[in-house]
Amino acid sequence: MSVAPSLPAPHAAFLEAAVPRLAADPRLVGVAAGGSYLTDSLDEFSDLDLVIAVAAEAYEPVLADRQAIAATLGPLLVGFTGEHVGEPRLLICLYGPPLLHVDLKFVREDELAARVEDPAVLWERDGRMRAALSNGTARFPEPDPQWIEDRFWVWVHYVAVKIGRGEILEAADALASIRGLTYGPMALASRGARPMGVRKLEQVAPDLAARIARTVAACDAASCLAALQDSIALYRELRSEGAPVELRVHAEAEAVSYVDALAASRREA
């Protein structure tokens, strides 16, 4: 197998060693790379995203062997499954030295058709991986504006009450969650980029990144309140530029009024 000449040396060395070892396992039918590999933008800070296609009849035994398989591919320091990101098929691995983060997603051959991107096939058995991929079309989930509108004002109120109670760590954490679930993806989508939280926003849309930076709170009440008000303003702006939604007018009015009253009470204190 040959790898792209532009890959950083640790990434290239890992693939050169790992792919033939995976190909030697008769239960596997293909290996492909996704993520930054597809855009030739891997750098020294990038992880490797690998999809490992498994014959349907061997899938459960391979899942049981994931740790052992990962350990054959390089100097494995630790590996754990991805339930916390909603992907139990994923084994998240750290190899090294040199340190290299590698995501190994073990996918049943007949489930390859359902995917968010078209990975680059690095090796396959008898054309089976490409054949399975041809049965479907890649579709990355876009932000659902109505889903966001239905939740945004409840979350605004939640942050405000945490600030009012003095639970500042909780407020700052909730602000970060709102950013990653709502106006972060909306901002990326508005520039035609993949809407993954706020990932690579600085490169894709530095002007919007500067705006979103104002929603990042320090660990004090005044900063959290200012970040919440900036979050409201930015969400309204991005909402007005996107697809029409059924506005939750009353929820918006009450939540914003609550935030304004909280800000007024703090100024008077």
Image (spheres, grey):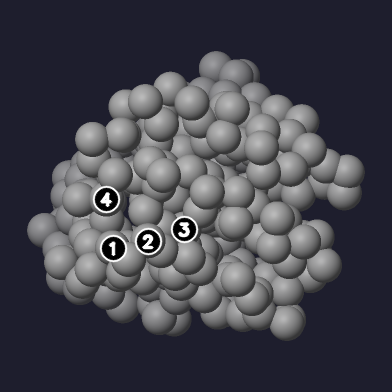
Image x and y of residue 119, in percent: 42, 68
Q: Which mark is residue 128?
A: 1
- In the depicted structure, whether residue 243 falls above or below residue 254: below
Element assignment for label 4: helix
Q: Report the Cα–Cα distance between label 4 and label 2.
A: 11 Å
Front residue (pair 179, 41):
41
Front residue (pair 236, 35):
35
- Quadrant location of the N terminus in the rendered image: bottom right
Query: Label 4 belongs to which residue?
Result: 109
Q: Are marks 2 and 3 in contact (CB under 8 Å)?
A: no
Q: Are marks 1 and 4 in contact (CB under 8 Å)?
A: yes
Circle count: 4
Q: Report the Cα–Cα distance between label 2 and label 3.
A: 9 Å
Say left or right for 61 vs 263.
Answer: left
Q: Nearer the N terminus, badge 4 or badge 2?
A: 4
Query: Label 2 belongs to which residue?
Result: 125
